[in-house]
Image: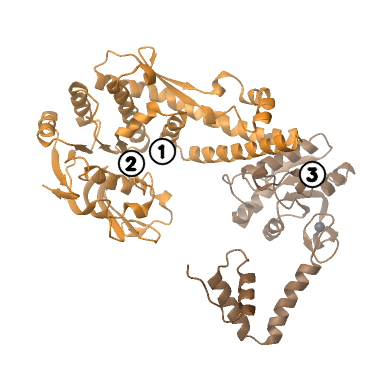
Chain colours: A orange, B brown
Amino acid sequence: MLLESINVLNYRNITQSDLTFSPGINCFVGDNGAGKTNMLDAIYYLSFCKSFFNSIDSQNIKHDENFFVLQGKYEKNNMKEEIYCGVKQNQKKQFKRNKKEYPKLSDHIGFIPLVFISPSDELLIMDGSEIRRKYMDGVISQYDHYYLELIIRYSRILLQRNKLLKDMAQSGKHDLSLLEAIDLQLVNTGNLIYNKRATFINELIPVFERHFTNISGGKEKVEIIYKSHLSLNNFKEQLIQNQKKDLILGYTTIGIHKDDLDFNLNNFQLKKEGSQGQKKTFAIALKLAQFDFLATHQNVKPILLLDDIFDKLDDKRGSSLLKLVAEDHFNQIFLTHTNKLNIETILNVTGKQFKIFEVSNGNIIF
Amino acid sequence: MSVLHFPSRLLEASVNEFSKLPGIGKKTALRLVLHLLRQDKTDVFQFSDTIRLMREDVKYCRECNNISDSEICDICTNVHRDHRIVCVVESVKDVMVIENTQQYSGVYHVLGGVISPMDGIGPGDLFIDSLEKKIENDQIDEIIFALPTTMEGDTTNFYLYKKFEKKPVKITTIARGVSIGDELEFIDEVTLGRSLINRQLFESTL
Ligand SMILES: [Zn+2]
């Protein structure tokens, strides 16, 4: 996957920039708030039909303007592809591939594979379990289209079950045969999701470990453990065992909606004991593993965006990371950095083709 | 949206009534009402009388809950149809869709909905009793589930299956080549006809 050039008009704080990119590494340098991350976001937008930072489109239009346009020229499997996105205030957004408008935005998502590594990835380690389930769901649904349907169906069944439990708790009338009918749906769908998640984690572990070792230098022992009620015991039996409790609480206490991942480092909980650098390395390795899954399953190497990765990483980890992503294993890379001289030195060492763009006040100066 | 200013309260009242219909906004409602105003009075009265009559005289078949002009619908009174095979559907729309395939000669049973706690619909809100009675009286050999492949459709299928599984009736379901979430009206006739012919035992789908 190659982004050859981009035209950005009125996107966030960027007035206009028309850039031609290197097939190797492209680096946006500038002070904080200059707009370098917005350039990454524009590239992200063309892949996911939305901003990484702000899902309200009208707020992504530059102040005092009433539209923005993003246009990217790509090369995918030796074919030229032109992706156009136009957003006008109070109008439906337009997404076009080779001048033809997509009937549904979801038809486009996945067509330009991309992985965005950003400082907020640390939430994968620090936040509650939901973000880790979203990580699993995000990666699996990128190669398994049926999976997303299962997730949507499961959440619907869960809503229905919880509503029924609440109704029963309020009225005191327990229609257990109806609960059984809904439980069957929950069990069938939940088991399918559990199996897919378990398979995914098994495949993920070796890929993740390789990336982690490469960045950290390899003295730390890392572990990912998939925690689910369903791995302990039969789902259906557990629902029956917890039926009384669920009926009192008015919601479902058992199921894959409570799944989580444990991250351990040298047999300790990473969340509690890990250093900033270790957490960041862990999060980056998870995202690089996502890159590998996409590359393998779609047979195209995704575009890699790295936002502010040297922050919180010591120089040694930072340069091993850059050396790692400069390998042939990865393809085209876009990154941001605050210090031009510093990054030039590092990039020179990688031996990979690179281009540096200076960003100041929403303008790109070369 | 700008507020519409009406020169007549009668006009406004009509527009309000039309805009209660699904898919009709205020602007479309105004267009329809102005159109009616330009028509002959007799045409407009025929229009309103027809609707009034429809609402007043349409009946629900006592046997199957299909919409009908008489106590028992045309399908249920038809002696050429196989009354020992009953196809269970969600709504009258589904009866029309299946009739269109011309692949089915049994009778129907219209539930009038599917179980959905979020919408406040439980088994008690569905039309089930007459089906139960027919099964009790040994009037039926087979019931075919043809409910939407949504979570709610599947829950209803399973609920009914559990209710009737011990009774001497064969329970089948239309073949599920269709993907999750499909409603009958969105399946093409040929596929739907085929899935009726290739129906399978419900038990085997569990
Ligand atoms: Zn009838």
Q: What residue sits right under mark 2 in the picture?
A: A113
Badge 1: chain ID? A
Q: Is residue B203 visible?
A: no
User: Residues under labels 2 and 1: Cα distance?
Assistant: 9 Å
A185 shown above or below B39: above
A300 shown above or below B196: above
Badge 2: chain ID? A
Residue B68 picture location, percent across and down: 79, 63
What label sits on residue B142 in the rendered view? 3
Residue at 63% of width from left, 66% of height from top? Answer: B21
Question: For the residue marked with disc 3, what is the amino acid?
Answer: Glu
User: Residues under labels 1 and 3: Cα distance?
Assistant: 43 Å
Label 3 CB less than 8 angstroms from ligand 1? no
Residue A335 picture location, percent across and down: 22, 37
Could you tell whether B110 is left or right of B22 in the image? Answer: right
Secondary structure of the residue carrying tag 3 is strand
The quarter holding residue A349 reads top left
Secondary structure of the residue carrying tag 1 is helix
Ligand 1 in which quarter: bottom right
User: In the rendered image, which quarter contains the C terminus of chain B?
Assistant: top right
Q: Give the number of the mark in front: 1 or 3.
A: 1
Q: Are marks 1 and 3 in contact (CB under 8 Å)?
A: no
